[in-house]
Amino acid sequence: MRSSMRGKLILLTTLFVLFGLFVAGKFFILDRQNAYGNIKVLSSPTASLFLNNVAVGRATPFEDRVKVGEYVLKLIPQGEATQTASWQGRIKIFKNALTYVNRELGSSDVTSAGEIFWVTKMESPSKNKNYGEIYMETEPQGAIVYLDNDEKGVAPLLLADVLKGTHELSVFMPGFFRRTQKINIDGRYRINAQIKLAIDQSQKRPEATGSAKLKEKKEATESAAAKKTRIKITDTPTGFLRVREEPTVAASEEAQVKPGDEFEVLEEKNNWFKIEYELGKEGWVSGQYVEKLE
């Protein structure tokens, strides 16, 4: 009799646990499906907005709640701005967080500028809840980063132990227009920023002659030789390195590779390396986190 009762209790306990796991799993799935974040998009001039090639039906300025996930955002200038370049890039929407996009659309990509900001929890939260961090990427790479007018280094750059509150973030590179933005830091959260600088066409550049032409020829030769070079991905602040469609931080993210991975270089351009990250799939990785192998 006792053995029979014990068996029934074990069976009931098992069924109860399984039911609890089922309910928890279902709740988690539904929570993910119904999770929303916020998106705010500004542009100059006004532009039509598309998410994953679907017209939203409203022009910029645009602000709404969107399901959590990754999207391809496209902006196409409206009205008389037909000679203005359109823009396209990948953005991510996180639960109960804001993704902010601002673009100043010029006549071409080099005269266009803008920024993308989004917030995530810190991977290694600070023990002090009054500090957050900022991760910066710029196009072109190597722009000087300033926080509250204090020079912090060159991008890509991770700024740790940033006191929560309002700060002024600014990036600058000679020959380009400075970009400045007010940001608000929350304790134990990271602001991720991608900033595109527009070229300052008022600063004339000398034509390539003499030694300059020889330098260009040398760089082209080195680029061709790079096809036989192998590279190794080094450690990054995020634990991975983005593979992009084009050699620029504003290009769409195609994949992610891990530190320690090795690849043969197909092409080199402006400290970017083109690799075959999967069979038949190619993309560009930043030379900031790459080590050339002998």
Image (cartoon, helix red, strand yellow):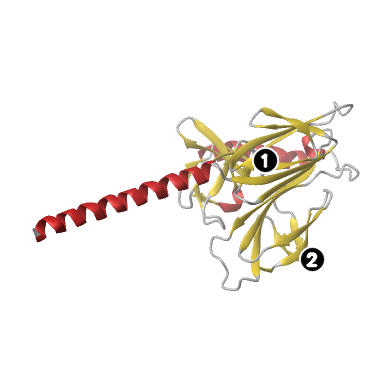
The dot on residue 132 is none
- Residue behind mark 2: 148
Instruction: Looking at the image, tell me whether mark 1 or mark 2 is earlier in sequence order.
Output: 2
Left or right of residue 10, residue 207 in this image:
right
Rendered residue at 10%/61% (across/down): 2
Q: Gap in Å between the C-alphas at discs 1 and 2? A: 41 Å
Does residue 241 sit above or below 130 in this rendering? above
Rendered residue at 80%/37% (across/down): 60
Does residue 2 sit above or below 199 in this rendering? below
Residue in the foreground of this view, choosing between 284 and 227: 284
Rendered residue at 59%/49% (across/down): 95
> How many numbered marks have been drawn onto this rendered protein structure?
2
Q: Residues within 10 Å of mark 1 (few under 14, many from 20)?
A: few
Residue in the foreground of this view, choosing between 7 and 162: 7
Residue in the foreground of this view, choosing between 25 and 77: 25
Q: Secondary structure at mark 2?
A: loop
Furthest residue in direction front, as rendered: 1
Which quarter of the rendered picture does the N terminus lie within? Answer: bottom left
x and y percentages locating residue 148 in the rendered image: 79, 66
x and y percentages locating residue 223 in the rendered image: 61, 39
Which amino acid is tagged 1?
Lys
Rendered residue at 76%/64% (across/down): 166
Q: Secondary structure at mark 1?
A: helix
x and y percentages locating residue 160 in the rendered image: 64, 66
Work out whether residue 209 can be spotted: no
Work out whether residue 116 can be spotted: yes
Which amino acid is tagged 2?
Asp
- Residue behind mark 1: 218
Left or right of residue 35, residue 218 in this image:
right
